[in-house]
Image: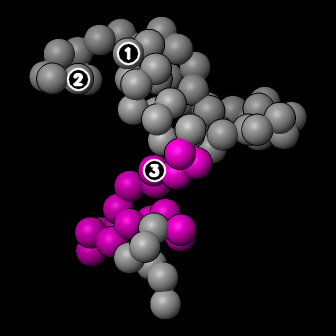
Amino acid sequence: MEDGRVTPADTVDHIEPHRGDGDKFFDPKNLQSLCATCHSSRKQRLEVRQVVDYGCNEAGMPNDPSHHWNEP
C-alpha cells in the first residue's frame, strides 16, 4: 500500500539481500511479495545503502542490530 492505495503484489523480494548467497536466494522464509513500485523505490534505496529495515519491537526500538539506537 502506498499513499492509501492498495496495489496487487507482482514482485518477489528478498527480505534480506542475498548478495549472491544461494541459500538466501532460494530460502522461502527470505521471500516476500511487493508491488513493483515499492520494490523499485524504498526497498532498493535501502539495499543500495546496505541498510536493513527490520521494523521495531513492541517498545518502539529498532530491531535492526546496526541501527544507531542499538549502539552501546
Task: Report if the CB atoms under discs 1 and 2 are less than 8 Å apart.
Answer: yes
Q: Earlier in the sequence, mark 1 or mark 3?
A: 1
The amino acid on which the numbered mark 3 sits, given as a three-letter code, is Asp
Say above or below: 3 vs 27: above
- Residue 24 figure quarter: top right
Q: Name the residue under label 2.
A: 2
Q: Which mark is residue 53?
A: 3
Q: Which of marks 1 and 2 is nearer the N terminus?
A: 2
In the image as oriented, which residue stretches furthest toward the right? 22
Instruction: State how far apart marks 1 and 2 are (Cα).
Output: 9 Å
- Residue 34 location in percent, x, y? 44, 22
Whether residue 34 can be seen here? no
Instruction: State how far apart marks 3 and 2 are (Cα).
Output: 17 Å
Q: Is residue 7 left or right of residue 3?
A: right
Q: Badge 3: how crowded within 10 Å, few (<14), some, or many (20+)?
A: some
| Magenta segment | 49-66
Q: Name the residue under label 1.
A: 37
Instruction: State how far apart marks 1 and 3 are (Cα).
Output: 17 Å
- Residue 4 figure quarter: top left
Q: In this view, does 5 lie to the left or right of 33?
A: left
**Secondary element at image label 2:** loop
Q: Which of marks 3 and 2 is nearer the N terminus?
A: 2
Which residue is painted at 58% across and 48% down in the image?
Answer: 50
Residue in front for this viewpoint, 16 or 40: 40
**Secondary element at image label 1:** helix
